[in-house]
Image (tube, rainbow, N blue to C red):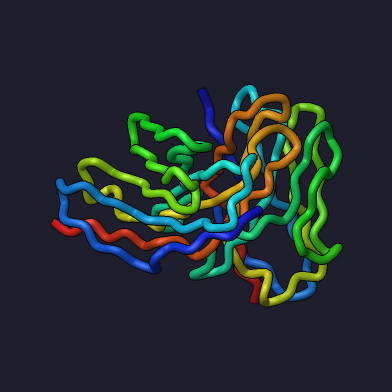
Amino acid sequence: DAKTTQPPSMDCAEGRAANLPCNHSTISGNEYVYWYRQIHSQGPQYIIHGLKNNETNEMASLIITEDRKSSTLILPHATLRDTAVYYCIVKVSGAGSYQLTFGKGTKLSVIP
Amino acid sequence: DAGVTQSPTHLIKTRGQQVTLRCSPKSGHDTVSWYQQALGQGPQFIFQYYEEEERQRGNFPDRFSGHQFPNYSSELNVNALLLGDSALYLCASGSGTSKETQYFGPGTRLLVL
């Protein structure tokens, strides 16, 4: 699976959009971009994933550049409960391949 | 709809002992993966079970072994515990026959003294 690069930490004001970047310049054509987050001492929580089109769900939006070498996770209106470590992971989707390779992620602090 | 559950929540052992951790997957899921998360690090993949067999394994020694039962629940066993085995152990479940993503349990925090 391709490796990812994320900033170690970011701050965001409560109520503002949080934009978390991720670089994955060696991504292959069949690899998806996944985002998980981990609130302190809890298990990671799935947020969203995508292949090449932008995706949106009730939690967030995922913007993937046209060359697929980078992506941005957007939390449209950050709240204090969004304070967590956010992991960007690239892997092949589908049955038979469940290994997620976590890096150190981005620690997002939402500030009142 | 119950999510992924793990037991126990916390555990204290001494070096050289053996430990068994348990995981019940989310309803409808048949694949279980185990991860180890040391303090300040991201989770590291240990292995994955599907149809009661180990399908993938990460870079962990044979002291780490597992089992999956017919009801899809799973156990992680660690023998000859070392101080470095102290970590949060996470279980994740998914569906082996679809592209659905994985969901994680709350973890078991193991402290080896």
Front residue of A36 and B107: A36
For the question of whether residue B91 can be seen, the reply is no
* Residue A59 relative to residue B23: left or right: left
Vertical placement of B77 versus B16: above or below?
above
Q: Which quadrant of the figure has residue B68?
A: top right
Front residue of B68 and B8: B68
Question: What number of labels is visible?
Answer: 0
Residue lying at 75% horizontally and 27% vertically, measured from the top left: B71
Q: Farthest front residue?
A: A67
Front residue of A1 and B94: A1
Residue lying at 51% horizontally and 44% vertically, measured from the top left: A34
Front residue of B36 and A68: A68
**Where residue A50 appears, x then y in whole percent?**
49, 37
**Where residue B58 appears, x then y in whole percent?**
75, 58
**Where residue B103 appears, x then y in whole percent?**
55, 38
For the question of whether residue B78 can be seen, the reply is yes
**Where residue A63 appears, x then y in whole percent?**
38, 42
Is the C terminus of chain B in the top left, top right, bottom left or bottom right quadrant? bottom right
Vertical placement of B7 versus B58: above or below?
above
